[in-house]
Amino acid sequence: MASEIEISAMRRALDAARGVARTLPNPRVGCVLLSPDGKELAIGVHRGVGTPHAEVDALTQAGEAARGATAVVTLEPCNHTGNTGPCTQALIDAGVARVVFAQIDPNRTAAGGTKTLKAAGIEVEQGPLAEEATDLNVEWTFAMTAGRPFVTWKYAATLDGLSAAPDGTSKWITSEEARRDVQVFRAEADAIVAGTGAVIADDPRLTVRDEKDLPLPFERQPLRVVVGETKIPNYYRVFDRVAPTLLIQSRDPEVVLKKLVDNDIRHIWLEGGPRLAGAFWNAGVIDRIIGYIAPAMLGSGRAALEGEATTLADLRPITIDDLTMVGPDIRMIGTPGRMQREDFD
């Protein structure tokens, strides 16, 4: 059983991991090294693809002091060689005596760390704060277990559910505060997906921007994904050099998701296009909804979602996880449930 000192160290490891905005396609991981008498030697954190894993980061800081230490890690140490070597071997080579980790690694490619560590004579304890550790990487864990990216659909609408006027104009339904808030959530995804119709109509940048509305550096930008068969003129902003762009000539969610899996995408930010959103909604592959509702009505225009419902049996319930005022607007975060008819299919 983990000691109180180890549980406290796990909380610090979780806090360290939360301090990194995005590490996708890898998970966020923190590691605290403790001396045999329980003193903190180092705090390591993973900062993204190609950077040291949290365990290696901590071991590098501690040096020889890591021999005989306890490694407290938010995720089971990986057991495979990717862009970096296996963390299990790094811990063994450093002479660590005990490993305490929270979440079991759901990645089949990297799993098996516990068995390798025990075979090397290292004491292993699993479980403390496992729920908190899993919550830290909800989208990544989903992608590992479901075999497809986690999909967050974002929309903005009036109180009567409209996202654009009859002439197609939609800038701006919600406030500047809401648009700023969107950037925080966008930054957590590794792909921003929009349909060709929305791109042609609005010429969006589909980038993550700072508080001055300037794009973040290229290496911190999610992949821009434009979905559909309509040709986009090459002078549109999605083709600038601010962020990478991928074109997928299909609106079929299964095709789109498969293509994104092939590109190691774990978390999709879906926006821009009620038809595209409707296709994902009908397919039941929207995992989270973030809606910004403006205190205004249009009376006519384009709905935020264009699905294929024909009866109330097609009603999909939403569990409301959060309601917050953002400036004058309401931000709703929810989790879609199953349609009534799906329970009979």
Image: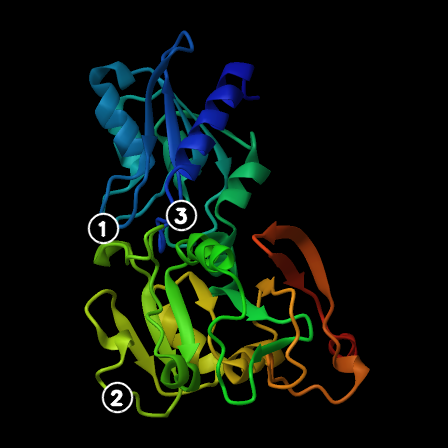
Q: Can you tell which mark lies on residue 233?
A: 2
Where disc 1 sits, the SS reads loop
| Residue annotated with mark 1 | 83
Q: Quadrant of residue 28?
A: top left
Q: Label 1: how many residues lie within 10 Å, few (<14), some (14-19) or many (20+)?
A: few
User: Is any part of residue 68 visible from this angle?
Assistant: yes
* Alpha carbons under labels 2 and 3: distance apart: 36 Å
* Colouring method of the image: rainbow
Q: Label 2: how many residues lie within 10 Å, few (<14), some (14-19) or many (20+)?
A: few
- Name the N-terminal-most of marks 2 and 3: 3
The residue at the point 56 percent across, 89 percent down is: 166
Where disc 3 sits, the SS reads loop
Position of residue 326 in the picture relative to residue 118 (left or right) = right
| Residue annotated with mark 3 | 27
Amino acid residing under circle 1: Asn
Amino acid residing under circle 2: Pro
Task: Give the image location of residue 341, x and y in percent.
Answer: 77, 80
Q: Quadrant of residue 287?
A: bottom right
Position of residue 142 in the picture relative to residue 234 (left or right) = right
Query: Which is more foreground, mark 1 or mark 2?
Result: 2
* Alpha carbons under labels 1 and 2: distance apart: 36 Å
The residue at the point 49 percent across, 77 percent down is: 170
Q: Quadrant of residue 316?
A: bottom right
